[in-house]
Image (tube, rainbow, N blue to C red):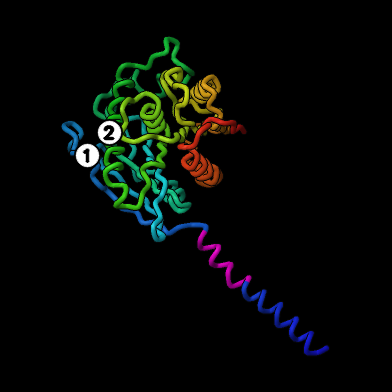
């Protein structure tokens, strides 16, 4: 009897030892170590007046998860905000690194800030978008130009990604674009308006941005994940509603829309502390299903 009890206790101790010894392994596998590589040139230095301004130069930062053998990471291209007059690719480093720790390579880009050197009181996002959708459906011509210039540079960054993804263990076929404010406006323009992109975009993440006219979104366009504050006075929440309505009209039910009650513009801290898990889940779900038939099957919240 004593021998049997001793054998049972020994077996239990062995099981407990195995269980407890594996906990750190699982904990370590939840997040990857991230390598950040700064100031990689993705296209030639722009001409004057942008050539003396590092914030307007065509450079990018990479956030690369630690590489298991043979692993290629899905990619998120992130475009910073700043009203096409300010901001820098390093301004959202905390969010970029947090996403990368979840196994997604992040490419954070600088681009030409047109309104920084072509100031016009009527061209800002607040003047055009703060009170709702434009009555005539059009932005100020200088804002249109700023978006187009930023989108041109973002497209050059996509070409760089196509050419260099393999070197950094990135899977350019699993690609999403994102941004905040002006960066989100640029990402939306690239995904839904800009023709002949060098890479296929699987999805978009829009942090408090907007499209001039959501009607340009075509059937079978990539889905979008939207976060927008209900009290945003810079880019009105009506822009999120317009995107939601258009996705509904085109049958794109993989898109998700999250209206943050009482929040204003540029609520990055909320995303970093409360929503990053949702963002990562959306990215992984979309890039893994983008090439499958029936990509717009229902997904609602």
Q: Which mark is residue 246?
A: none
Residue farthest along the right direction in this orientation: 1
Residue 267 at x, y = what percent?
Answer: 49, 37
Residue 165 at x, y = what percent?
Answer: 31, 47
Magenta span of residues = 19-29
Q: Which residue is mark 1?
A: 43
Residue farthest along the left direction in this orientation: 48
SS under mark 1:
loop
| Residue 20 on the magenta segment | yes
Q: Is residue 300 left or right of residue 160?
A: right
Is mark 1 in CB contact (under 8 Å) with mark 2?
A: yes
Looking at marks 1 and 2 on the same chain, the residue that comes earlier in the sequence is marked by 1
Tell me the quadrant of the picture where the N terminus can be found: bottom right
Residue at 52% x, 34% y is: 227
Q: Quadrant of residue 187?
A: top left
Q: Which mark is residue 153?
A: 2
SS under mark 2:
helix
Residue at 38% x, 33% y is: 183
Mark 1 vs mark 2, CA separation in Å:
8 Å
Residue 210 at x, y = what percent?
Answer: 44, 25
């Amino acid at each position: 009897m004593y021998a049997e009890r001793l054998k049972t206790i020994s077996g239990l101790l062995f099981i407990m030892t195995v269980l407890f010894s594996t906990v750190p392994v699982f904990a370590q596998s939840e997040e990857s170590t991230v390598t950040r590589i700064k100031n990689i040139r993705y296209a030639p230095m722009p001409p004057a007046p942008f050539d003396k301004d590092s914030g307007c130069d065509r450079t990018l930062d990479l956030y690369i998860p630690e590489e298991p053998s043979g692993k290629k990471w899905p990619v998120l291209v992130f475009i910073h905000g700043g009203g096409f007059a300010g901001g820098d690719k390093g301004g959202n480093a905390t969010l970029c690194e947090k996403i990368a720790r979840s196994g997604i390579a992040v490419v954070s880009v600088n681009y030409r800030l047109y309104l920084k050197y072509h100031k016009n009181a009527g061209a800002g996002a607040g003047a055009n978008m703060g009170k709702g959708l434009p009555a005539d459906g059009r932005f100020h011509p200088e804002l249109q130009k700023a978006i187009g210039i930023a989108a041109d540079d973002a497209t050059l960054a996509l070409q760089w990604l196509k050419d260099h993804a393999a070197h950094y263990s990135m899977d350019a076929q699993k690609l999403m674009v994102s941004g905040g404010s002006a960066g989100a406006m640029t990402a939306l323009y690239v995904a839904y308006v800009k023709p002949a992109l060098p890479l296929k975009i699987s999805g978009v993440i829009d942090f408090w941005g907007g499209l001039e006219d959501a009607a340009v979104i075509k059937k079978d366009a990539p889905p979008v994940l939207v976060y927008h504050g209900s009290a945003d006075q810079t880019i009105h929440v009506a822009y999120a509603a317009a995107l939601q309505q258009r996705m509904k009209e085109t049958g794109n039910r993989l898109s998700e829309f999250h209206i943050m009650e009482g929040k204003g513009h540029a609520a990055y801290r909320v995303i970093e502390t409360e929503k990053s898990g949702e963002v990562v889940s959306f990215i992984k779900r979309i890039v893994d299903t983008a090439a499958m038939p029936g990509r717009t099957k229902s997904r609602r919240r």
